[in-house]
Image (cartoon, grey):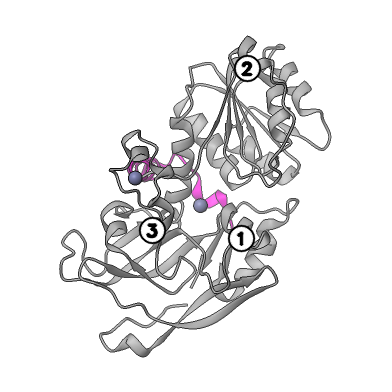
Amino acid sequence: MKVKPYSQNDRALPMKVAAYYNKEQINYEDRHIPTIGDEEVLIRMEYCGLCGTDIHKVIDETVPPETVLGHEVSGEIVKKGAKVKDYKVGDRVFVAHHVPCFTCHYCKRGSFSLCAQFKQTNLDPGGFSEYIRVPALHVKHTMGLLPNGMSYEQGALVEPIACCLHGFELIDTHPGDTIFIMGAGQIGLLQVQIARALYASNIIVSDINPFRLDKALEFGADEAINSQKENVAEKVLELTNGRGADIIIISASISSLLPEALECVARGGTVLVFAPFKDTEVAIPAAKFFNDEIKVIGSYSSNPYNYEKAVYMLKNKVFDVERMITHRFPLAELDKAIATAHNPTASVLKVLITP
Ligand SMILES: [Zn+2]
Ligand SMILES: [Zn+2]
């Protein structure tokens, strides 16, 4: 569906958004098109990816009613403020939602996603909207041009890929390492492709969904373990001659995966927690940390420096985006999109929302 071009008199013209009220109710409703300031731009959304965190916020009801979620955005600039010099109307862009301050304690240590400002910045009203106001800080730090030949679909993948790259920045991988990715959803499969492209590694993936496991093998995994049929830790030890995986990335929101990972991580290995856990407490084999020099680290979101690399990798076809995108839903069917993506046994990977 094409939306008619924005004009100066459109302040009163409603636009459509998909707004969260509770887990049973997502409304397709009218809002005013946001007014922009001198250093801001207005974009018309082309695609907004549905992220696992959007689904988590809806299913676990962690955000206030009327919230417009969505942060993996690509679109076209339809209006710009007088002081915006680096972009023009008609530019094709990607944009993400959080901007750090670059000056606080955490930013100075390079932990940009821990910055207090980071979570306070956002797109207006959110990604699941026909039109989006991009605030000044985002114009400067989280928006970028899509290179010629890069599709809007690819543009919507910039943010999730940037998050995965941030995770890989935190781990120390070596050629020949075994990387074990727990969870072969949209994030796990991006990680398979990054691991395949950047590291000469042996890649193992586990999931309960046979469709996703097949995809993992297509995207470059060497082994795929069905965790409903096999003992995952035993299988990983078997596949690595008893050594275990050097790097384990937990990309599914199941806290019991942490003790399972610690059972099959190699000595000197790292477990990267890349998903939010609902249950806060799990029992872990504490003695391993000292004796085996095990590292357990977390990775949250991305930072502005990851976007350029994500665009570069997309441009160079590191990712098979076409095969990643299994579903497209219009804004009016965001509820259906969430139900589809939340079904752990469905044949679904990346879901994109369109106006
Ligand atoms: Zn995301
Ligand atoms: Zn900061």
The local secondary structure at tag 1 comes to loop
Dot 1 corresponds to which residue? Answer: 62
| Residue drawn where x is 44% and y is 54% of the image | 119
Give the vertical position of 196 relative to 98 (above or below). above
Q: Is residue 311 magenta?
A: yes
Q: Tell me the number on the disc at residue 289.
A: 2
Q: Dot 2: what SS? A: helix
Residue 292 position within the rendered picture, expressed as x and y whole percent measured from the top left: 63, 12
268 on left or right of 211 = left
The amino acid marked with disc number 1 is: Thr
Residue 289's place in the image compared with 314, above or below, is above
Q: Are marks 2 and 3 in contact (CB under 8 Å)?
A: no
Q: Is residue 145 visible?
A: no
Residue 301 in picture, x, y percent from top left: 47, 45
| Residue stretch in magenta | 304-326
Q: What residue type is labelled 3?
A: Thr
Label 3 sits on residue: 121
State how far apart marks 3 and 1 are (Cα). 18 Å
Disc 3 + disc 1, Cβ < 8 Å: no
At 61% from the left edge and 40% from the top edge, which residue is drawn?
251
Q: Where is residue 21 in the image (x, y as percent from the top left)?
A: 61, 73
Three-letter code, disc 2: Phe
Ligand 2: give its quadrant. Answer: top left
